[in-house]
Image: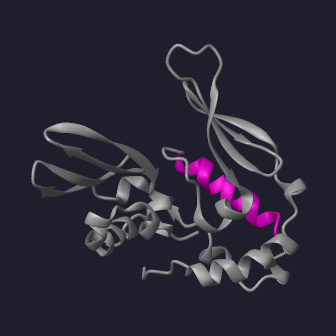
Amino acid sequence: MRDERPSADQVSAWGGQFQKAFDPAKVKKQQIVLDPLRTLVIGERGIHLLQTVGYKPEPEVMQRQAFEHLFFCGPKISDIPFEVRKALRDALWEAVDADAVAFTKRQVFQLFDYEKIAEKRWERRRGEGGDVLAIHRAGRVEISGWDNARDGGGHWISIEAAWHEPELHVPFNLKHLIPALLETLGAGRVES
């Protein structure tokens, strides 16, 4: 499958069409338990993740994503099972008047089979530090680094976020790896 990521200009143009053709009332509001600590909430205007954190008795909202961004980019939340991502994409598409838009279901919210994506790790050392870009089969990409033999911290992004907006997420020192990242992720794209 060739790279069919829509450009930022396309997404911007499609955004107005989406807003006119999308009926959020058609998307079923629900909570889906992803694991004992994380619950995906589908609400009035988008999704968010409730996560139990450490000592706190109540779960916290960790990530929010509006339906429009979710529709074009896929989930920012990592580790969502394939069946849940597919059902979510289908529900969003069913809430769009397909006759009123210039894009197709195939052009938005790419689906990935995380098991088909090879785990990879790239490092770039610089002096006493470095940067890491790593793909994990759990449905996430790690972006991290270190300085002077100390962990410099890092964060995880979803496979979908890395696919759709790599220029936004990949640090400057690792930008040259974007083509390799996209090629590796592309192996997990699913037609549906």
Name the residue located 18 percent from the left edge and 52 percent from the top edge: 130
Q: Is residue 96 above or below residue 56?
A: below
Task: Work out whether residue 139 can be spotted.
Answer: no
Q: Is residue 91 above or below residue 49?
A: below
Q: Position of residue 60 (x, y in %)?
A: 63, 28
Which quadrant would the N terminus be assigned to in this image?
bottom left
Name the residue located 83 percent from the left edge and 48 percent from the top edge: 44
Report the front residue among 135 and 156: 156
Name the residue located 41 percent from the left edge and 46 percent from the top edge: 156
Outermost residue, left direction?
127
Q: Is residue 55 above or below residue 18?
A: above
Q: How many marks?
A: 0
Q: Position of residue 154 (x, y in %)?
A: 35, 44
Which quadrant would the C terminus be assigned to in this image?
bottom right
Q: Position of residue 27 (x, y in %)?
A: 82, 53
Q: How is the image coloured?
A: one colour
Q: Position of residue 143 (x, y in %)?
A: 34, 51
Location of residue 114 (image quadrant): bottom left
Residue 127 on the magenta span:
no
Report the front residue among 147 and 22: 147
Report the front residue among 132 and 163: 132
Residue 87 on the magenta span:
yes
Name the residue located 72 percent from the left edge and 80 percent from the top edge: 14
Task: Work out whether residue 59 can be spotted.
Answer: yes
Report the front residue among 85 and 123: 123
The secondary structure that dominates the magenta segment is: helix
Q: Which residues are magenta?
A: 81-96
Location of residue 31 (image quadrant): top right
- Residue 29 as seen in the image, left or right of residue 126: right
